[in-house]
Image: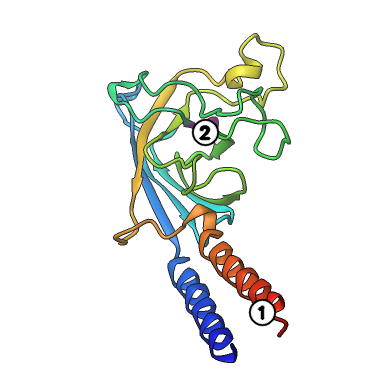
Amino acid sequence: MFHLLTITLALCATLSAGAQTRNTPMEAIAYLTGPLQSDNTQVKGNVTFIQNDCGQSVHVRIQLENVMEGKHGFHIHEKGDLSNGCTSLGGHYNPDKVDHGAPHHEVRHVGDLGNIEVNASRTIDITYTDSVISLNGQRTIIGRSVVLHELEDDLGLGNHTDSKKTGNAGGRIACGVIGIKSDVDEWPCRDNGAGTLGQSLSIVAFVVGLLIARGL
């Protein structure tokens, strides 16, 4: 019986170690581009998403050029369909079917990432963190899209009829589909990182129950 317990503990340790080695950073990227603007320039650049571990917040780095000075709504949209340019990407990614809001609001679309503010240089390179979007699980943003809007997002606080839907952020001046950038054969998370731990605990519970039943 002692031999059985030793084997079980060793197996659990191996499973737990395997879970840790799979929890490597995940990285995704979207290349954004848009139609020619009135000054014959074109918004373009990259948006990179990094999630260091299963269930953790996502770091978002935005690197864009030729963006008009001012604030612009910035969102994850539900589709990755560029067959008709930015117009065929659907609405904000909103699996909960709730009102539009700011990134820090308790009630918000998953895709509500607020505004970016661009200075007179018309370029931007910023990084921030969002705790709602994810690169894994049932609500992954992989295969969906990033859209940069013409106007400032009112964060659901305005009086316009579109305020609670889109933030009244105007037209779509650039967009891109989010794809996997990580050099991995398999996306590392399993059940948001809980699968292997759950297996280990189940094995331990089974063996402890068996030992108790046999009076050890």
Magenta-tinted stretch: 70-76
User: In the figure, is residue 121 to the left or right of 181?
Assistant: right
Q: Main secondary structure of the magenta part?
A: strand
The local crowd at label 2, few if under 14, some if 14 to 19, many if 20 or more residues have their Cα within 10 Å, is many
Secondary element under disc 2, as helix, strand or loop, is strand
Q: Nearer the viewer, residue 8 or 213?
A: 213
- In the rendered image, which quarter is residue 109 located in? top right
Residue at the limit of the structure toward the top, as seen here: 161
Reply yes or no: does residue 214 show up in magenta: no
Q: Position of residue 20 (x, y in %)?
A: 50, 72
Image label count: 2
199 over 213 or under it: above or below: above
Secondary element under disc 1, as helix, strand or loop, is helix
User: In the figure, is residue 147 to the left or right of 97?
Assistant: left
Residue for point 51% across, 65% down: 196
Q: Nearer the viewer, residue 62 or 144?
A: 144
Residue for point 37% across, 18% down: 87
The mark lying in front, picked from 2 and 1, is 1
182 over 215 or under it: above or below: above
Q: Position of residue 64 (x, y in %)?
A: 41, 42
Q: Which residue is mark 1?
A: 211
Residue for point 60% across, 26% down: 153
Residue type at mark 2 is Phe
Tag 2 near tag 1, CB within 8 Å: no
Residue at the limit of the structure toward the bottom, as seen here: 2
Q: Position of residue 7 (x, y in %)?
A: 51, 85
User: In the figure, is residue 3 to the left or right of 34?
Assistant: right
User: In the figure, is residue 175 to the left or right of 40?
Assistant: right
Reply yes or no: does residue 71 show up in magenta: yes
The circle on residue 74 is 2
The circle on residue 88 is none
Q: Position of residue 157 (x, y in %)?
A: 72, 22
